Amino acid sequence: MINYNPKSIRAFIGAKNYSESRAFYKDLGFEEIVLSSNMCLIKVNDALSFYLQDAYVKNWINNSMLFLEVDDVEKCKVDLLSRGLTEKYATVRFTEIKEEDWGKEIFMHDPSGVLWHFGQFNTTK
């Protein structure tokens, strides 16, 4: 067991086109905090964030995945699709909602190819 108080955990992801990815995440509704000319912090909300880097290694990006737990995946899907991201960004795509034993999720590929899982876990009643 650790004897200190962790406050957050943040992934680092890369971008094929850094300026396009920055714009994409802002269009997704996330907040950007510029840290340097080649890195920014992307905040989903006050508790959830990740680092976006101006770095592209195809095998790394093509194997990067992030899972964002949401309380209502159907509501999430409506919000995601209402933003017109597939019209604005040629490589962005979404799947239909998939139902699994553990819950349900929708997948999104960002402009660089990073795979996002927006998932809702089953609740025990």
Image (tube, rainbow, N blue to C red):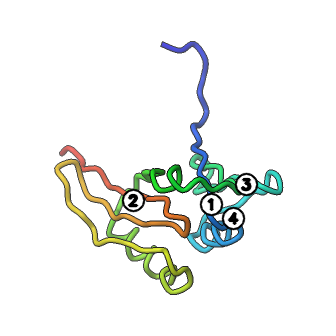
Residue 23 position in % (x across, y down): 67, 72
Say which quadrant the C terminus sits in. top left
34 to 17, vertically: above or below: above
The residue carrying mark 4 is: 18
Query: Which of 124/81 is in front?
Result: 81
Residue 118 is marked as: 2
* Residues packed near mark 4 inside 10 Å, few (<14), some (14 to 19) or many (20 plus): many
The residue carrying mark 3 is: 40
| C-alpha gap between disc 4 and disc 2 | 23 Å
**CB under 8 Å between discs 2 and 3:** no
Q: Of the two numbered discs 4 and 2 on the same chain, state the one appearing first in sequence.
A: 4
Which three-letter amino acid code belongs to the residue tagged 2? Answer: Phe
Which three-letter amino acid code belongs to the residue tagged 1? Answer: Ala
Q: Residue at x 49, y 75 (%)?
A: 91
| C-alpha gap between disc 3 and disc 4 | 10 Å
The residue carrying mark 1 is: 15
